[in-house]
Amino acid sequence: MSQFMDEMRVIPRGAWVTAGFVYVLQVLVIVLGPLRMEREMQQWELWQQGLFAFGLPLLVILYVALVGYVYGDAKRRGMRHVMWAWLALIPYFIGVAAYFIMRDPLPQPCPSCQTILPARFTFCPHCGTPTTRICPHCGKPAERGWANCAYCGTKLPGQEQKLENRK
């Protein structure tokens, strides 16, 4: 639940205020509009009228919050957050789906100087420390658990010591 709350904090306060304002406005429009004027809707039972008046606008709140999340998440990832928020407004959630497919990984701190860096950086531009393991032969990045380079097959340094310590 803590991770969910952390993700909810990404949504800007302005999006929550907008969602609340839109919700109240929609409830007023529905209660004063169709529920009062349409004879067919007046014949609905009370729970049906309540669900229509208060439940339907909840979908709009969720949509506004989702657009706010796209904005805040893109901003924390160093992406073009305004552009992605506008794209998230494309009908049928096409923009939202495109965002979740194409978003960048979260920035990570440099292991040495703690400067926040985009995940794609191999070296810290401030102190020069490698942020990922590098193959000494081909220079391509190597993941932490690899014993050999996936690109050229060279044995990566540091793995032999770990294997000897386990024995």
Image (tube, rainbow, N blue to C red):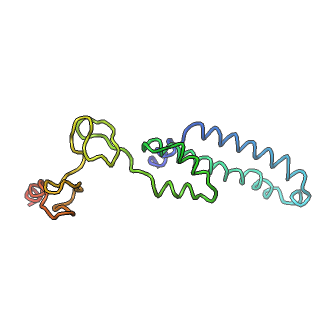
Residue 24 lies left or right of residue 12; in this view the side is right
For this orientation, the residue located farthest to the front is 138
Residue 140 lies left or right of residue 84; in this view the side is left
For image coordinates 79% across by 44% down, the residue present is 28
Image spot of residue 45 (x, y percent): 84, 59
> Which quadrant is the C terminus positioned in?
bottom left
Q: Quadrant of residue 118?
A: top left
Image spot of residue 128 (x, y percent): 21, 39
For image coordinates 57% across by 37% down, the residue present is 13
Residue 96 vertical position relative to residue 21 in the rendered view, above or below: below
Q: Quadrant of residue 25?
A: top right
Image spot of residue 133 (x, y percent): 20, 51
Name the foreground residue: 138 vs 17.
Answer: 138
Image spot of residue 65 (x, y percent): 59, 47
Residue 51 vertical position relative to residue 77 in the rendered view, above or below: below
Q: How many marks?
A: 0
For image coordinates 85% across by 53% down, the residue present is 34
For image coordinates 61% across by 54% down, the residue present is 90
Q: In which quarter of the image is residue 24?
A: top right
Name the foreground residue: 139 vs 103.
Answer: 139
